[in-house]
Image (cartoon, helix red, strand yellow):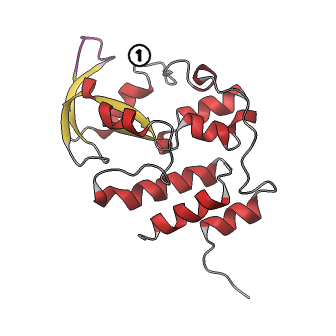
Amino acid sequence: MCFRSISFLAALFFLSPLAVVSTPALSYDRSEWLPRWSDADGDCQDTRHELLIRYSLAPVTYTRADSCRVDTGLWLDPYTGHFFTSASDLDVEHIVPLKWAHERGGAHWSRERKRQFAEDPDNLWLVDDGRNQSKGQRGPDQWMPPYAPASRIYVQRFMAIVQKYGLRPSLAEASRFEALAAGS
C-alpha cells in the first residue's frame, strides 16, 4: 500500500511518542529563548535588521553610515496586507510564538535549541507592531490574521514549524489547524 500524503495530525501521532499531549511546562522565561537578536555573521546587523533588508521591496536606507540599522524601506505586512516604509513600525513576529512552543515541548530544550528556534527565519515575519502585540502567544486556533488572503499561508507556515521542531499541540489544536489549513 502506498500513501501519497500524510495529514498533519497523523504526522504528529506517528512521529512523536508523546504526540498531541501537552507537556507540563516549566516556568517560561523569554530571555532563555531570546535575550536579544544576534549578529550571527558579524556584519553589525542583527537578525531583525537582516530580515528588514531581506524582505524590503525597495532599497533600504540606514540610520547611520555604518549600515548597521535599517531606517526605511518598503515592507508588506502579511497579517494586514498594508505596506510600511518605516522600519520602526514593524516587529519581528514569531509565527509560532516562543511561549506557545515552550508549553508544547520546547520547555525541555537546551538554551541553544531555544535560541535556534527563536531566530529561525522560517518562523519569522515582519508585521505591524500593533498586530504582533494583539496576537501575543496564541496559535491559529485562537488568533488569525485579519487579512484573509494570508490566513491559510499563516496556518501552513505555523504547522510546518511545529513539525520541523517536533512540538506537540493538543489533539484539539492539531485538528483545528488541519481544518484551517484546508480552508474550513
Outermost residue toward the bottom in this view = 1
* Residue that extends furthest to the top in the rendered view of this protein: 65
**Residue placed most toward the observer, 98 or 112:** 98
Note whether residue 20 is visible: yes
Q: Is residue 21 left or right of residue 133?
A: right
Q: Does residue 86 lie above or below 181 as drawn?
A: above
Query: Which span of residues is magenta-colored?
Result: 62-68
Residue at the spot 61% in from the left edge and 40% down from the top edge: 101
The dominant secondary structure in magenta is loop
Q: Is residue 80 above or below residue 38?
A: below
SS of the residue under disc 1: loop
Callout 1, which amino acid?
Answer: Cys
Residues 50 and 114: in front is 114
Q: Residue at x 65, y 47 (%)?
A: 165
**Residue 136 position in % (x across, y down):** 45, 36
**Is residue 65 magenta-colored?**
yes
Quadrant of the rendered image containing residue 93: top left
Quadrant placement of the C terminus: bottom left
Q: Which residue is under mark 1?
A: 44
- Nearest the viewer among 36 and 121 is 36
Residue 44 location (% of width, % of height): 41, 16
Residue 52 falls in which quadrant of the image?
A: top left
At horizontal 49% and vertical 24% (from top left) the residue drawn is: 41
Is residue 148 positioned above or below 167 on the image?
below
Q: In the rendered view of the protein, which quadrant contains the N terminus?
A: bottom right
Residue 128 seen in the figure:
no
